[in-house]
Image: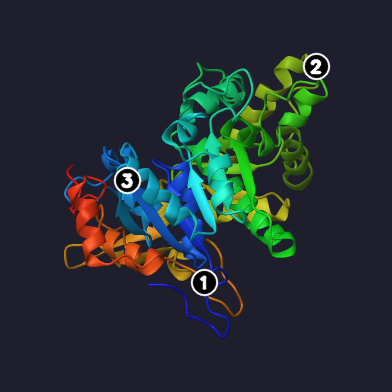
């Protein structure tokens, strides 16, 4: 299911990760680290992971759950019990990284906050993802991706550029960006630990991840609002819409010089120039019966172009197929199902998911024996006390 091992194997093969997170932002970090070779154990709490509600409904797991949790082992604990908290602390003592995305204060209330865990494992890297950070005036606010899309300025800018009401994005961008930044921070902390033997608590807010990843923020930082025209313009064509990338004034000047377009806006006020020039480019695009001729002309003008594709078309494209974007994993019912692989391709090391998504509690006994050396009597005692839950397919 993964790339060839190469002579160096997986980059993070010696790292153990406890993934005490749900939905997208935290599980995405665990998925990244797992694809890089870490041994990732997802800790399921009573109530399950909300991501089981999103995706194909006739399979044991939802599509989103598989995408975020492929390759992880799964244990099921009840941290509402003293025994569950005690057992979790013991597991933390044996791991390198702990990922959580609970609201600030929840981990402390459960008895597994940073100060307590750092005493047990001074080399621990604990990543805490939250909407607005562990401290600050909005730290306690519940925050899902749409909240951060709105609060970070992205939706307002899109509405202004598109001249429409603000509407949320059709993807959890804030979660994905927080996950990416979280994985980077974990890797940096692990490297620092190599030198210092000191662990870190990483406080990562989705709000800051959005702003740090936004290449328009500099306009606002310098009190000079961003241009409303955007960085790419889509034009209709009978063979399918075409996007021409670039700032609209640059697109116009390039086409004016290479294709000899006449400027209709010479005597128009500045606010009307954009629309007038856009009409000329639109008519020029429609004059091409075959898009391939249009693409050749755009390349002659040194302009980047794109066919506006659906996601279905994107995952079936020649680039996606040739580079093996989708890889098969165990579907837990005798076959396979596809997940998108992480985009890491090493010259002489492996990456990629090594298994599908596990059932709740599927590896509880295996992990507790491997990490803590528990015997059958101890395992049965934990089950009897309600600390452990038996392995079970998800109820959907």
The residue at which mark 1 appears reads as 13
Q: Does residue 19 sit above or below 94 in this rendering?
A: above
Q: Residues within 10 Å of mark 1 (few under 14, many from 20)?
A: some
Q: Nearer the viewer, mark 1 or mark 3?
A: 3
Residue 144 percent across, percent down from the top left: 46, 29
For the residue pair 248 and 361, the one nearer the viewer reads as 361
Q: Secondary structure at mark 2?
A: loop
Q: Secondary structure at mark 3?
A: helix
Lower sequence index among marks 2 and 1: 1
Q: Does residue 171 sit above or below 121 in this rendering?
A: above
The residue at which mark 2 appears reads as 267
The residue at which mark 3 appears reads as 83
Quadrant where the image shows the C terminus: top left
Lower sequence index among marks 2 and 3: 3
The residues bearing labels 1 and 3 have C-alpha atoms spaced at a distance of 30 Å
Q: Nearer the viewer, mark 2 or mark 1?
A: 1
Q: Nearer the viewer, mark 2 or mark 3?
A: 3
Q: Residue at x 52, y 29 (%)?
A: 104
The residues bearing labels 2 and 3 have C-alpha atoms spaced at a distance of 79 Å
Lower sequence index among marks 1 and 3: 1
Residue 364 percent across, percent down from the top left: 29, 59
Q: Secondary structure at mark 1?
A: loop
Q: Residue at x 16, y 63 (%)?
A: 333
Give the farthest residue toward the right: 222
Task: Give the quarter of the image for residue 148.
Answer: top right
For the residue pair 349 and 323, the one nearer the viewer reads as 349
Q: Are marks 1 and 3 in contact (CB under 8 Å)?
A: no
């Amino acid at each position: 299911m993964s790339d060839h091992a190469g002579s160096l194997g997986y980059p993070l093969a010696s790292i153990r990760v406890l993934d005490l997170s749900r939905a997208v932002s935290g599980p995405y970090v665990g998925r990244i680290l797992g694809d890089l070779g870490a041994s990732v154990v997802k800790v399921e709490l009573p109530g399950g992971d909300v991501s089981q509600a999103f995706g194909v409904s006739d399979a044991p797991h939802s599509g989103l759950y598989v995408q975020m949790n492929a390759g992880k082992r799964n244990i099921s604990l009840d941290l509402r019990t003293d025994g569950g908290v005690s057992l979790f602390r013991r597991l933390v003592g044996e791991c390198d990284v702990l990922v959580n995305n609970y609201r600030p204060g929840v981990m402390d209330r459960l008895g597994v906050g940073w100060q307590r865990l750092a005493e047990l494992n001074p080399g621990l890297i604990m990543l805490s993802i939250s909407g607005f950070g562990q401290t600050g005036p909005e730290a306690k606010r519940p925050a899902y991706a749409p909240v951060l899309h709105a609060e970070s300025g992205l939706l307002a800018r899109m509405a202004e550029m598109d001249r429409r009401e603000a509407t949320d994005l059709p993807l959890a961008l804030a979660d994905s960006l927080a996950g990416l930044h979280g994985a980077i921070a974990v890797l940096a902390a692990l490297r620092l630990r190599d030198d210092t033997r000191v662990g870190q608590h990483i406080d990562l807010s989705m709000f800051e991840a959005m702003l740090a990843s936004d290449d328009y923020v500099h306009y606002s930082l310098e009190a000079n609002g961003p241009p409303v025209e955007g960085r790419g313009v889509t034009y209709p064509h009978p063979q399918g819409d075409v996007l021409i990338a670039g700032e609209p004034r640059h697109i116009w000047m390039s086409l004016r010089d290479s294709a000899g377009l006449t400027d209709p806006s010479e005597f128009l006020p500045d606010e009307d120039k954009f629309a007038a020039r856009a009409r000329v480019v639109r008519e020029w695009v429609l004059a091409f019966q075959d898009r391939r001729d249009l693409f050749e002309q755009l390349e002659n003008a040194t302009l980047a172009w794109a066919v506006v594709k659906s996601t279905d078309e994107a995952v079936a494209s020649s680039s996606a197929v040739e580079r093996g974007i989708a890889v098969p994993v165990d579907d837990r019912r005798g076959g396979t199902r596809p997940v998108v692989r992480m985009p890491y391709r090493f010259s002489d090391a492996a990456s990629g998911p090594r298994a599908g998504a596990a059932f709740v509690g599927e590896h509880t006994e295996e992990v507790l024996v491997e990490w803590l050396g528990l015997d059958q009597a101890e395992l049965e005692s934990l089950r009897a006390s309600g600390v452990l839950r038996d392995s079970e397919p998800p109820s959907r």
